[in-house]
Amino acid sequence: MKKEKIRILGNIAGTKGLGGFLILSDTSPDFKGIKTGSILKIGYSVSFTTDFLFEELKREGNKILLKLKNIDSREIALELKDKAVFTDEKNIMTDGSESYYIENLIGCEIIDIENNNKIGIITDVLTLPANDVWLVDTGKGELPVPFIEDVVKKVDIKNKKILIKLIDGLMDLISNEKEN
């Protein structure tokens, strides 16, 4: 049996209507849909999820709406708000363009685009409601790098290199756990 490759689809930003539809946000640009009958794992981390059976996906303007089996009221749906949605990659329909999956990012070298200096290596990825945060081991401590357009300038998964622009104050966030 083939091992699952769990991918994040996005985060549940809220609900729509009274029937239990969930608003899915923060999806990758190449996301097109989910295969009917897929199992979706919902939780704050891939290690702590509950399985749900996917029933339907609708698009309303720029919103992606999910319907899950047995989530049939707004009250039940609200309990899932702010949690991430994960599934096996085989369940995801995409347009084929490159996506940044967590296991692809781990081990990537972070480089300052301004001076080409190595900042560190990504050791973990936090999936937060506003944006992902990459945890980078700098050798002096851990630097949280927000995955936002102002910071991340080029991602080269193939060569495991990511160019970022250091915004004011970012390097001040290095935790000094390693010095203790």
Image: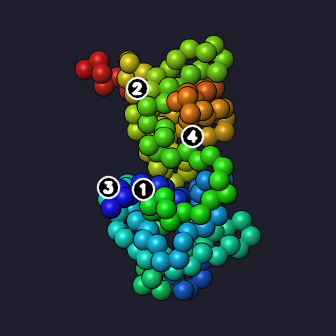
Vertical side of 74 occupied by 13: above or below: above
Query: Quick one: label 3 or label 1, which is nearer the N terminus?
Result: 1
Q: Secondary structure at mark 1?
A: strand
Vertical side of 109 occupied by 5: above or below: below
Q: Residues within 10 Å of mark 1 (few under 14, many from 20)?
A: some
Q: Secondary structure at mark 2?
A: strand
Query: Alpha-carbon distance for marks 4 and 2?
Result: 16 Å
Viewer-proximal residue, 9 or 78?
Answer: 9
Amino acid under disc 1: Ile
Viewer-proximal residue, 79 or 54?
Answer: 54
- Which residue is situated farthest in the right direction here? 61
Q: Position of residue 105 (x, y in %)?
A: 49, 38
Residue in view at x 64 percent, y 76 percent: 58
**2 and 3 marks in contact (CB < 8 Å):** no
Quarter of the image where one finds residue 161? top right
State how the image is colored: rainbow
- Residue underneath mark 3: 47
Q: Position of residue 125 (x, y in %)?
A: 44, 42
- Residue underneath mark 2: 137
Query: Quick one: label 1 or label 2, which is nearer the N terminus?
Result: 1
Query: Quick one: label 2 or label 3, which is nearer the N terminus?
Result: 3
Vertical side of 5 occupied by 85: above or below: below
Q: Tell whether 73 sits left or right of 23.
A: left
Query: Quick one: label 4 or label 3, which is nearer the N terminus?
Result: 3
Residue in view at x 66 percent, y 17 percent: 114
Vertical side of 92 occupied by 132: above or below: above
